[in-house]
């Protein structure tokens, strides 16, 4: 079955540590996205990539980094520079360069302890 | 950033009632998407709209792309308990490459 997989589902991190969230898709989608969701709020775009080896900052990129070395994979690193990292992180992908129909993974809940 | 105004923020209804929610913006959109999110899960695409005036149904769900291209609504008929969740609208603004999301409508159903 084709789909988009995020791991882990839950992640705990100590303050000052970097942590990497995994996102893999086997839908052969060109574009991939990372969103952050805080309680009671909509989704905010962190980074997106329309093609391998290329990515762009979204609306809230500070304190985050990404790579797109393979079409299937778009890992997100939450660095110690992110002041408020506790949130629900969602990865999405879409066919073609535009997010005309973005499909989402199941999310990773990151908690900083 | 660009803003989508989604309303209402929350709804408390009885099972069997119809539901209506909408999104509006001052920007012109090329695409409207409606998603449903269950607690602790990622959003699932319900309906995609691509043309002004387009009216699309998916079972008990009906959504329309506004004629002005600045708004969209989602209707749910004869609500059932599994309709509970958060519904998000999302739009692709003309000339942009990023989706803009509404703040969500939280639907609660009393049996």
Image: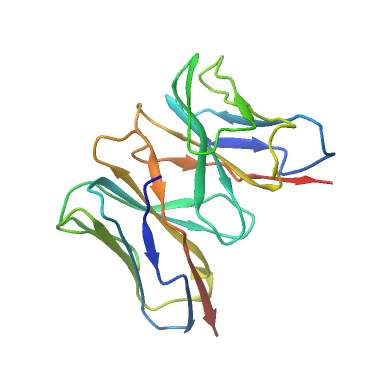
Give the side of residue A25 with respect to residue A85, left or right.
left
Give the side of residue B40 with respect to residue A103, left or right.
right
Which coloring applies here? rainbow
Q: Is residue B87 visible?
A: yes
Q: Which sits in the foreground, B108 or B1?
A: B1
**Quarter occupied by residue A72:** top right
Q: Is residue A2 visible?
A: no
Residue visible at 62% across and 26% down in the picture: A65
In the rendered view, would you say B88 is above or below A91? below
* Screen quadrant of the N terminus of chain B: top left
* Screen quadrant of the C terminus of chain B: bottom right
Q: How many marks?
A: 0
Give the side of residue B18 with respect to residue A27, left or right.
left
Give how far across and how far down residue A110 sits, in percent: 72, 44
In the rendered view, would you say A31 is above or below A111? above
In the rendered view, would you say B60 is above or below A25? below
Give the side of residue B99 with respect to residue A72, left or right.
left
Residue visible at 70% across and 41% down in the picture: A83
Give how far across and how far down residue A109 sits, in percent: 70, 47
Give how far across and how far down residue A71 sits, in percent: 50, 19
Q: Which sits in the foreground, B18 or A75?
A: A75
Give how far across and how far down residue A108 sits, in percent: 67, 43
**Quarter occupied by residue B8:** bottom left
Residue visible at 35% across and 27% down in the picture: A96
């Amino acid at each position: 079955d084709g789909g988009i997989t995020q791991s882990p589902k839950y992640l705990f991190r100590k303050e000052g540590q970097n942590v990497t969230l995994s996102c893999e898709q086997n839908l052969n989608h060109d574009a991939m996205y990372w969103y952050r969701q805080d309680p009671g709020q909509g989704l905010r775009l962190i980074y997106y990539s329309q093609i391998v080896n290329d990515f762009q900052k979204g609306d809230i990129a500070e304190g985050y980094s990404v790579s797109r070395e393979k079409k299937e994979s778009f890992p997100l690193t939450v660095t110690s520079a992110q002041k408020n990292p506790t949130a629900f992180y969602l990865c999405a992908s879409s066919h073609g360069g535009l997010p005309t129909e973005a499909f989402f993974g199941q999310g990773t809940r990151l908690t900083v302890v | 950033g660009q803003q989508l105004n989604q309303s209402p923020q929350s709804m408390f209804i009885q099972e069997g009632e119809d539901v209506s929610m909408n999104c509006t913006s001052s920007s012109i959109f090329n695409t409207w998407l409606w998603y449903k999110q269950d607690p602790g899960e990622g959003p699932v695409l319900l309906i995609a709209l691509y043309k002004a005036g387009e009216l699309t149904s998916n079972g008990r769900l009906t959504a329309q792309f506004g004629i002005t291209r600045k708004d969209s609504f989602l209707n749910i008929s004869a609500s059932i308990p599994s309709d509970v969740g958060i519904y998000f609208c999302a739009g692709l603004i003309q000339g942009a490459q990023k989706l803009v999301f509404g703040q969500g409508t939280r639907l609660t159903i009393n049996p």
